[in-house]
Image: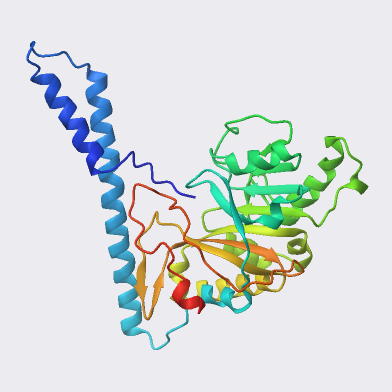
Amino acid sequence: MDHCLVPGSEARIALYFYVFKKRLSASQGIEVISSNQIKATLHRVYVYLYWRIRRVLLHGFRQLRYWIWSTFSPIEPSYPMLRFLDEAKGARLTRVGSPNDGGYLLPDLALEKKPSIVISPGADVNVTFESHFAEMGSLVICLDASVEHLPVEHPNLIFVKKFLGPHNSENWTTLETILEEAIAILPSLGQPLSEWPLDSNILQMDIEGWEWQVFEGVTPATLQAFEYMIVEFHDTHLFYEPKRFKQMTAAIRNIMSTHRLVFVHRNNGDKMLRMGSVDVPPLLEVTFARKDINFESELEIPASAPNSPEFEDEFPNWLAKYAS
């Protein structure tokens, strides 16, 4: 999930001050500018500078932290995300949802039929992807305890004010539990349960780092219920920490037991890190297909639209050199 609320580029800031200056020096006299206009301009400048500076400082801190670790640690673990390439297959892809953040690439095969259930934890306020499948007639379950409601209403869109995680509690639910609850709701859409294929579902997950614990403990039977999964992996640059490496390795092993990679894309909201011989993105979006779905072609990784168009995308197709 991209939280960068940057409103534009340096050119836009220059435009704000140009308009500001022109209004003050208008030939017909000084034009009155309301305090709200001034505040709005200064706020845009503040937001822009905040996220730019934060991005640079965070990148420097992460790079320094890795340098300290690599200097004093005798162990150099390999970047575990590259293991997804072992069984990867290529597929013709179509973007569903927003043109940037909030939109995702799915194989064309996934769009040739209506999925029974779409589960989307971490829906936040952008539900263009989810709305697409609600319009198709699928049952769409959106989970997010950080918002009060969805920005749109649709009879097939169900909002659950909970986080997805490794356990059940008042504010949390597991993937197994929410899947069982979704199956129980299906008959309310007008078709008996027997007419819904219960293994024809889609998972779209963006839960700010909790995905590692979810996939570490998930059962193969639960994963088999999803034909396609789209997952944003967070903090992949922390693979060198022993505890995190163990958790990531277990999660990747569970996913690869049932699914294979068909598309991968780095989220350019954070800068790339150079770690050993590998360029490592802190944020990584991956599309998976269940292994019983046949794709004949070899993996090709087309460049995708950047999540944050206001930031440069230094590596639009960064994984191509590792896929050969």
Camera-nearest residue between 85 and 60: 85
Residue positioned 73% across, 35% down in the render: 156
Reply above or below: 275 against 46.
below
Residue positioned 83% across, 54% down in the render: 198
Reply above or below: 119 against 261.
above
Going by the image, does 277 lie left or right of 162?
left
Going by the image, does 316 lie left or right of 220?
left
Residue 161 visible in rendering: no
Applied colour scheme: rainbow
Residue 181 spot, x, y in % from top left: 79, 46
Residue positioned 75% across, 66% down in the render: 293
Reply above or below: 258 against 7.
below
Residue positioned 60% across, 32% down in the render: 149
Residue sticking out furthest to the bottom: 74
Q: Quadrant of residue 47?
A: top left
Going by the image, does 66 lie left or right of 203?
left
Residue 81 spot, x, y in % from top left: 52, 72
Residue 154 visible in rendering: yes
Residue sticking out furthest to the top: 28
Reply above or below: 55 against 300.
above
Residue 36 spot, x, y in % from top left: 27, 20
Q: Quadrant of residue 184?
A: top right
Q: How many marks?
A: 0
Residue 320 spot, x, y in % from top left: 47, 72
